Image: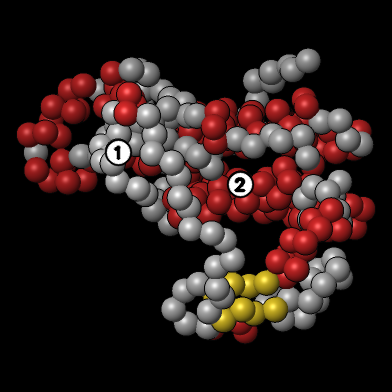
Amino acid sequence: MFRHQKELQFEVKVEKPDPLLAKQIQEVLGGQFGEMSVMMQYLFQGWNCRGEEKYKDLLMDIGTEEIGHVEMLCSLISQLLDGASPDDQQKIAQDPMMNAIMGGINPQHLIVSGLGATPKDSNGVPWNAGYIIASGNLLADFRANLNAESQGRLQVARLYHMTKDEGVRTVFRKMLARDRYHQYQWMAAIKELEEKKGFVVPASFAPEDELEAQPHAYELWSLSEGTASKNGPWAQGAAPDGTGEFVFLDNPAPMGQVPNPPVPPTTLHHEIDVDKKL
């Protein structure tokens, strides 16, 4: 059961309207790595969780917090849009200087949402459920969560430097701090699962099950110009799970055959000379 509380997690109070910034902030609301994405990702992972109860609780805690972050950003965008109107749009179009300053106003904020936030990114692309990952494998999902928090915090940090509005920056500092904690959180959870299950996903498919393919699990194939990649820990020394030693393969040779598919039926309308052998 979810219960809405009227107070926001943190205070949202901008210094002045800024429709262009409102458009930019839509990215961290409804973009691929925005708050809507992490909200849905954590909630679906939590609802589907069949692991230890503490992991389910952790996912539901942060997923529910992210609902609050979505509401904070909606409030922030609405405040930045206060005072904007269709008349402003017309004035901007007539004044070259104003057009240069505020010409990036999102018309959907005026036409579609009535000066409110929308579940879209900064280009007006609707939020997509394909942005989220909820595989049922906790280690795989928690690694995806760490990436989501890393990308999301990066985008908020970039927006922070795109405005001088101290009210907006105050909100962003709170979000940056929470996103930093969430990175700590997922790193700790990942470490615990790696200690329990090993480093490789899924743990249920052991290295020895790879049979004759197992040696390829330790090879770095040099397939681009330059060999500097051999200097990393991924090309020498023991694998993290201790099952083998990394090797660097310079100029590796292909080990497969040349494909030689049969000529397809002419009824499929391929532009192929059926009398010519492939």
Task: Tell me the distance, in whole angstroms, between the alpha carbons under discs 1 and 2.
Answer: 51 Å
Q: Nearer the viewer, mark 1 or mark 2?
A: 1
Give the residue type at disc 1: Val
> Which one is nearer the viewer's eye here, 250 or 8?
250
Circle 2: element type: helix
Decide if residue 248 is on the left or right side of residue 152.
Answer: right
Q: Nearer the viewer, residue 186 or 88?
A: 186
Residue 163, horizontal then vertical, whole percent = 39, 51
Give the labeled residue for mark 1. Answer: 274
Disc 2 marks a residue whose amino acid type is Ala
Residue at (11% x, 33% y) in the render: 93
Which label is found at residue 148? Answer: 2
Judge whether 4 appears above or below 257 on screen. Answer: above
Q: Residue at x 73, y 65 (%)?
A: 217
Q: Please state the horizontal and vertical placement of residue 62, each as a whole percent of the image.
A: 73, 36
Q: Quadrant of residue 3?
A: top right
Residue 198 seen in render: yes
Question: x and y percent of residue 261 in the render?
Answer: 45, 45
Q: Residue at x 48, y 58 (%)?
A: 258
Q: Are marks 1 and 2 in contact (CB under 8 Å)?
A: no
Q: Tell me: residue 49, above or below residue 249.
A: above
